[in-house]
Image (tube, rainbow, N blue to C red):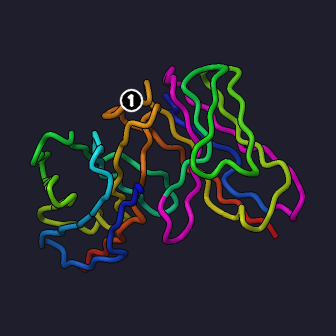
Amino acid sequence: NAGVTQTPKFQVLKTGQSMTLQCAQDMNHEYMSWYRQDPGMGLRLIHYSVGAGITDQGEVPNGYNVSRSTTEDFPLRLLSAAPSQTSVYFCASSYSGTGGDEQYFGPGTRLTVT
Amino acid sequence: GEDVEQSLFLSVREGDSSVINCTYTDSSSTYLYWYKQEPGAGLQLLTYIFSNMDMKQDQRLTVLLNKKDKHLSLRIADTQTGDSAIYFCAETIPRGYQKVTFGTGTKLQVIP
């Protein structure tokens, strides 16, 4: 199993540009989520999905969109990039999203918005 | 509100024990976790404890939970240079979905 994969690893955007961060998992997990990691702030939940066709907002959803058309893929779209979105983005998946369920994290995408 | 706090940095000598501490505020936490992040990588689950337990031991790792004081600790025995990483404490709170709140992370430096 490849686990959770993310592309690209690094990206530089100009303010106002849009892009999609890709996330895929091959473990048949129902629950997938996106976090951003900023210095001194831990990880904050952006959006999550409990299964194909079902998504919901986390703590910091503004400026981001998600969709879940298949169990495997959970892309994160930045609609109009802003410098405040400079961060490291992690995708994670788990079997059901319930407590005690191990979350598997991807390697991250480091995004810089200038 | 939900808040998870950790000290930012810990330095220990190789072979000593490391103790990383965490405090949380939400008494409705169901599970508490310790994750490890190595440079340039994602987070990896080390261990977790259910909120009705006081202690959990897994090889070199010991997790202690003081629910009254909302304090969680991770003890690493015989710390090795390969243990150098950032350690995140996290809690799961049932909020319709299982909301996971992460601490800010403690960077552990192991001195040879």
Residue closest to the eye, A80 or B84: A80
Q: Quadrant of residue A114?
A: bottom right
Classify B83 as above or below B100. Answer: below
Instruction: Measuring from the top left, give residue B49's x and y in whole percent.
Output: 21, 43
Instruction: Measuring from the top left, give residue A81's x and y in whole percent.
Output: 82, 58
Residue hosting label 1:
A98
Magenta span includes A33:
yes
Q: Amino acid at mark 1?
A: Thr
For the view shown, which residue lies furthest in the right direction?
A16
Q: Give the residue at x 15% y 40%.
A: B52
Instruction: Measuring from the top left, give residue A1's x and y in whole percent.
Output: 48, 27
> What is the quadrant of the C terminus of chain B in the image?
bottom left
Q: Quadrant of residue A74?
A: top right
Q: Give the residue at x 42% y 60%.
A: B38
Magenta span includes A107:
no
Q: Give the residue at x 31% y 34%.
A: A100
Classify B72 as above or below A4. Answer: below
Give the side of residue B5 with respect to residue A108, left or right.
left
Instruction: Measuring from the top left, give residue B58's x and y in whole percent.
Output: 14, 45
Chain ID, mark 1: A
Magenta residues, as a range? A13-42
